[in-house]
Amino acid sequence: MFDYHIDEEKDVRPATHRKDVRIITQNVRGFRKSDMWEWLAAWRGIPMMHHPALIILQETHMQTEAERDELIQRWQLLWGQPESASPLSYWSVGSHKEGGVGVLVFPDYQQSVRPWNRHLWSTRTLGVQLNELHVLNLYAPSSKKQKREQFFC
């Protein structure tokens, strides 16, 4: 399911010592729960030097606080982080099966990331601040012209 080629000759510095900031975006199209766990766990097998700072996810279809809490807990545990530590993920929760966004934070950047404009978060938008960089995860409607136009107005 997850194929990742690593060129060991390239940048071998720890993530926090790189000059670049790596951010990956992934539309998960409502992964089944088992597929989501497998996808999340696959990141643990990738050498730390190849980790991005953030993964921003769209179309999570997360509908309940319980689902959100379970994902937060699993991502924290995957990296050996207690639940009381600084969050390693942020999620929006919706009332229906469309939209939904999330941000996964890798441990090297845990102390550098914080929520940004949380009062403006919705089922389709979520923002974090990584040092001086503001990252907005936005999932706009792709069908029905009226919904798209309404979203951007």
Image (tube, helix red, strand yellow):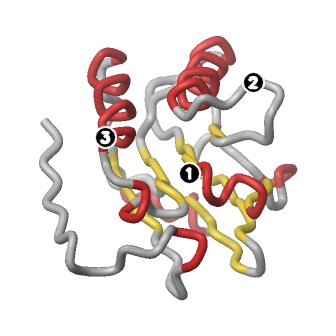
In percent of the image, x 79 and y 41: which residue is there? 86
Q: What element carries label 3?
A: helix
Residue 134 x, y percent position in the rendering: 70, 74
Q: Quote the CA–CA distance across marks 3 and 1.
A: 13 Å
Q: What element carries label 1?
A: loop
> Depth check: 153 or 126 in front?
126
Mark 3 or 2: in front is 3
Earlier residue among tags 2 and 1:
2
65 in relation to 131, above or below: above
Earlier residue among tags 3 and 2:
3
Residue 145 x, y percent position in the rendering: 38, 59
> Depth check: 133 or 82 in front?
82
Task: Report which residue position mark 3 lands on.
Answer: 45
- Is 5 positioned to the left or the right of 25 in the image? left
108 in relation to 57, above or below: below
Q: Quote the CA–CA distance across marks 2 and 1.
A: 15 Å
Task: Report which residue position mark 2 lands on.
Answer: 83
Instruction: Name the amino acid, label 2.
Output: Glu
- Is 51 positioned to the left or the right of 153 in the image? left
In percent of the image, x 47 and y 57: which residue is there? 140
Circle number at residue 106: 1
Q: Is mark 2 on a helix, strand or loop?
A: loop
Instruction: Name the amino acid, label 3.
Output: Gly
Instruction: Name the amino acid, label 1.
Output: Phe
Classify 10 Å Cα crowding around label 1: few (below 14), some (14-19), many (20 and above).
Answer: many
Q: Name the quarter where the C terminus is drawn.
A: bottom right
Q: On the image, which quarter does residue 36 sit in?
A: top left
